[in-house]
Amino acid sequence: MNDYIELRVNITPCDETATDILAAMLADGGYESFVPDSTGVTAYISARQFDSKTVEDILAEFPLHGRKLSTCANTIEGEDWNSEWEKHYFQPIVVADQCVIHSSFHKDIPACPYDIVIDPKMAFGTGHHATTSLIIEQLLAISLEGKNVIDMGTGTGILAILAAMRGAPAVTGIEIDPAAEANARENIVTNHHPEITIRLGEASLLPTCEPADLFIANINRNIITNYIAEYAKALKTGGTMLLSGFYEEDIPVILKAATPLGLTETSHTVKGDNWTCLRLVKNS
């Protein structure tokens, strides 16, 4: 049975910065889903991957000094996981009064021009996190008719689905995690967009993709800076790159890596606790 460990980490004092940082550190340690609240973070990992020593190491490296962290862990049977996640943690969301995101079991959904059904299971990306909604807002604001799109780290496929709904005739979603990749495929079928191709892998797949008019990466600062050269090669001259998964104060770090590649900032937007979406254009 595909059982999961529910790890609860209480943070005192707690704020959004602390929960975001902890979730990112746990993600690097293999945790797949996160529920932050006013007192800490609840995180989930496959029971096969759970290691108490890894948790101890993560907490020992927590960079915000003066915080007290305490933990407890429980086992959740795999057959109960999806229904529990959907019922308790995933609620419908409306972005910019244009896009509604909900699960297949939700009722009384607000009417919007773009209606996306996401059954997230263990994949990240329901639109609730600021980074996802920031990119959604960008996709709603720019023309995608006739544009080829690559969505790096597609997760549930939510951004790929919206890009197709907005008129992109060819969308490629790349995902490194097999469970997330399988979930993205399911969501593509549910939303009836066969023009979306989901591929399992990482940046090494990019040379085999058609060059993009729009390249999306909602990952994190370190991965983006490590692979931005590969991202730039996959983008057409004159194309747009949307990057998120980091804070506004991280923009200079991203630009330091991006500028030598012919990528120039055209704008950036900010939401929540200083999360940002950086919009770049490839000039050469």
Image: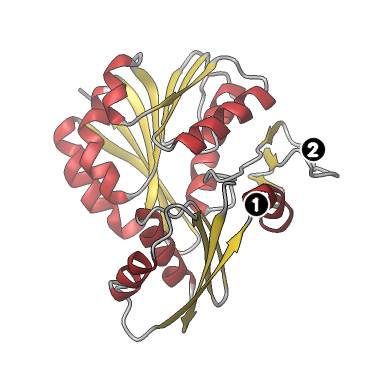
Please tell me whether residue 56 is drawn above or below residue 232 in the rendered image: below
Could one spot residue 124 in this view of the protein? yes
Question: What residue does disc 2 label?
Answer: 111
On the image, the x and y values in percent for residue 187 come to 62, 30
Rate crowding at label 2 as few (under 14), some (14 to 19) or many (20 or more) other CA atoms within 10 Å: few
Q: Residue furthest front?
A: 1
Q: Which mark is residue 69?
A: none
Q: Nearer the viewer, mark 2 or mark 1?
A: 1
Residue ID at (47%, 49%): 131
Nearest the viewer among 263 and 103 is 103
Q: Position of residue 257 (x, y in %)?
A: 18, 42
Left or right: residue 264 compared with residue 129: left
In the image shown, does 142 or 55 lie closer to the viewer? 55
Q: Is residue 188 above or below residue 19?
A: above
Q: Are marks 2 and 1 in contact (CB under 8 Å)?
A: no
Q: Residue 162 versus residue 192: which sits nearer the camera?
A: 192
Look at label 1 and name its amino acid. Answer: Trp
x, y percent for residue 195: 55, 14
Label 1 crowding class (10 Å Cα cut-off): few <14, some 14-19, many 20+?
A: some
Secondary element at tag 1: helix
- State how far apart marks 2 and 1 are (Cα): 29 Å
Left or right: residue 244 compared with residue 93: left
Q: Amino acid at mark 2?
A: Ala
Q: Quadrant of residue 50?
A: bottom left
Please report the residue visible at 53 percent of the width from the left and 34 percent of the height from the top: 159
The residue at the point 67 percent across, 41 percent down is: 101
- Give the farthest residue toward the right: 108
Instruction: Pick the quarter of the image with the C terminus.
Output: top left
Lower position in the chain sequence, tag 2 or tag 1? 1
Q: Nearer the viewer, residue 105 or 246?
A: 105
Q: Which residue is mark 1?
A: 81
